[in-house]
Each structure stands twice: as C-alpha cells, then as structure tokens.
Image: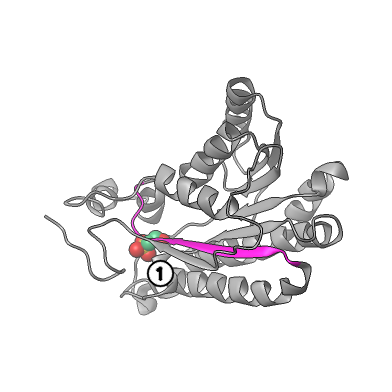
C-alpha cells in the first residue's frame, strides 16, 4: 500500500458531495490539496477547515470547469511547483433532467456535456504535461464515471452519453499513458445520496428525494473511501474500472426498493 501523505491532489467539484468527501478524506490522510470549484465562499470555508483540522496545505482554485479559458488561467495561476500534481481526481459532474430526447432542453444537454466531458478534458489537458514531465511512474488520474457508463435508461440519453464518454477517455488515456507508468482509473458509482438528484430535478425536491426512498443509498464517504483505495494501491497495481452500487442496486435498471 502506498500513502497519500504529502502528495499533491487536485480535486474538481470539490465543495460538495463526493468531491468534498474526497477533500476531507485525503486531507485526513495527509495529502496537500488543490481544490477547484466555482463557489468561492464554500471553497474558502473548506480550505480553512481542512487546513486547521489536518494541518495540510489547501489551495483554492475558483474556476468554472466548463470554461476552457478560465481553467487554463486558473491552472496557470499556480506556482510551477504546485502544477506538479500527483493525483488528479476528476470529480466535477452533474445531471439535469430526465427527459426523453424529443422533450430535452438544449441548455441541459450543454451543461452536462460541458461539465462532465469538456470540463474533464480541459483540466486534464493542463495537468498532464506536468505529470508526464515531473511525475512519471508515480502520478494517477482518477475519473468519476457512473453506472450510467455501463447501462442506459430512458431519459438518461445525454447524461449516460457523457459518462460513456468518460469511460472512453479513461480507457484511451490508460493506453496513452502506459509508456509513462501513469495510473488511470475510473470509479463508477450507482446511487449516491448527495445533492445530485436535487441538481437533476431543481424544481421538484419531492422527486429528487424519492430517487433514494425505499433503499439505503451510498453516501459520498463510501465513494471517497473507494477513491482512496484506488490511490493507495502498490505501485504495480492499477485499478482500471471499479463499479460500486448500494447493495439494493444491481445496475441502473435493477433496484430493490422496499
Ligand atoms: C449517477 C447514477 O443512476 O443517476 O451517476 O445515472 S444514475
């Protein structure tokens, strides 16, 4: 097992849900963090909390992952030393709506594609040249996929497409980075109770809540522990793809609700 102590870990979408749980768990384990998110107040609050509780360095990067120019500018605002990321956790992602394609809102599609797919590409594009030059044989990219990268469901059209794309990028990267011994993983959760469903159904909190009724869903900490597990495997071990669901969920479409 390897330790993440003193490693530099960049987490996107770090102020809520799985991203925040990862930030907390990696800080607890002694990692220094670069936390990227849009909401400056939440980011600063988390920075101060983690720095004082765990005595680690936490650098906030206020940035909209959907904006290529902003991502580049924020990354370039880091010192040369802080650009040498050991572990990149591409967590930022979201779903909007569950409409059939003929009823879909283009702004929802754009938001999902821009965040889940293009945002992941933008930040990875910045981080990778430094990993390849300075962190060969030690770096690790961990992407947040989804069970939606494995099975589709009605109304999942664009969201599932973004997660299938994350899987394709992960697999392609794994091959591209093989020569550098840089690890690449995807962690693919099923139902995790975060604000995910509230973001998906912003105008219907009952619908959002009902997604998890009748079963015990995963919580953000379950996924953070899984990500830490991937990040702490021995040097010769790469977790390529890890699918994790509640015990009551066998796949996107098979769920045992009481
Ligand atoms: C989240 C899982 O089932 O809402 O990525 O698509 S699901």
Q: Indicate the quadrant of ligand 1 in the picture.
A: bottom left
Residue 28, x across and y down, in percent: 56, 32
Residue 254 in percent (x, y) is at 23, 69
Image location (x, y in percent) of residue 165? 55, 74
Q: Residue at x 20, y 50 (%)?
A: 213
Horizontal side of 76 relative to 226 (left or right) equals: right
Depth check: give the residue in front, 217 or 25: 25
Of all residues shown, which one is farthest toward the top? 52
What residue is pinned by disc 1?
Answer: 148
Label 1 CB-ligand 1 distance < 8 A: yes
Q: Residue at x 68, y 77 (%)?
A: 175
Q: Which residues are magenta?
A: 181-193
Residue 168 in the figure: left or right of residue 203: right
Furthest residue to the left?
Answer: 258
Residue at image point 45% right, 68% down: 159
Work out whether residue 67 can be spotted. Answer: no
Q: What crowding class fits label 1: few (fewer than 14 Cα within 10 Å), some (14-19), or many (20 or more)?
A: many
**Quadrant of res 123:** bottom right
């Amino acid at each position: 097992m390897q330790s993440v102590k003193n490693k530099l870990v960049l987490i996107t979408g770090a102020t809520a849900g799985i991203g925040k749980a990862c930030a907390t768990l990696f800080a607890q384990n002694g990692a220094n963090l670069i936390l990227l998110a849009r909401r400056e107040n939440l980011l600063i609050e988390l920075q101060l909390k983690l720095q004082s509780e765990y005595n680690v360095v936490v650098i906030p990067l206020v940035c909209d992952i959907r904006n290529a120019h902003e991502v580049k500018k924020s990354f370039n605002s880091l010192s040369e030393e802080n650009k040498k990321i050991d572990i990149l956790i591409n967590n930022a992602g979201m779903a909007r709506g569950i409409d059939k394609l003929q009823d879909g809102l283009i702004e929802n599609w754009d938001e999902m594609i821009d965040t889940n797919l293009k945002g992941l590409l933008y930040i990875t594009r910045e981080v990778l040249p430094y990993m390849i030059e300075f962190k060969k044989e030690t770096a690790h990219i961990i992407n947040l996929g989804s069970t939606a990268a494995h099975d589709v469901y009605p109304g999942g059209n664009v969201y599932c497409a973004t997660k299938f794309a994350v899987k394709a990028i992960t697999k392609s990267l794994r091959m591209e980075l093989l020569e550098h011994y840089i690890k690449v993983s995807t962690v693919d959760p099923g139902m995790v109770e975060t604000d995910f469903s509230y973001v998906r159904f912003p105008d219907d909190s009952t619908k959002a809540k009902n997604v998890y009724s009748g079963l015990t869903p995963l919580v953000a900490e379950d996924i953070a522990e899984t990500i830490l597990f991937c990040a702490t495997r021995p040097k010769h071990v790469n977790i390529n793809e890890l699918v994790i669901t509640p015990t009551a969920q066998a796949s996107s479409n098979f769920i045992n609700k009481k």
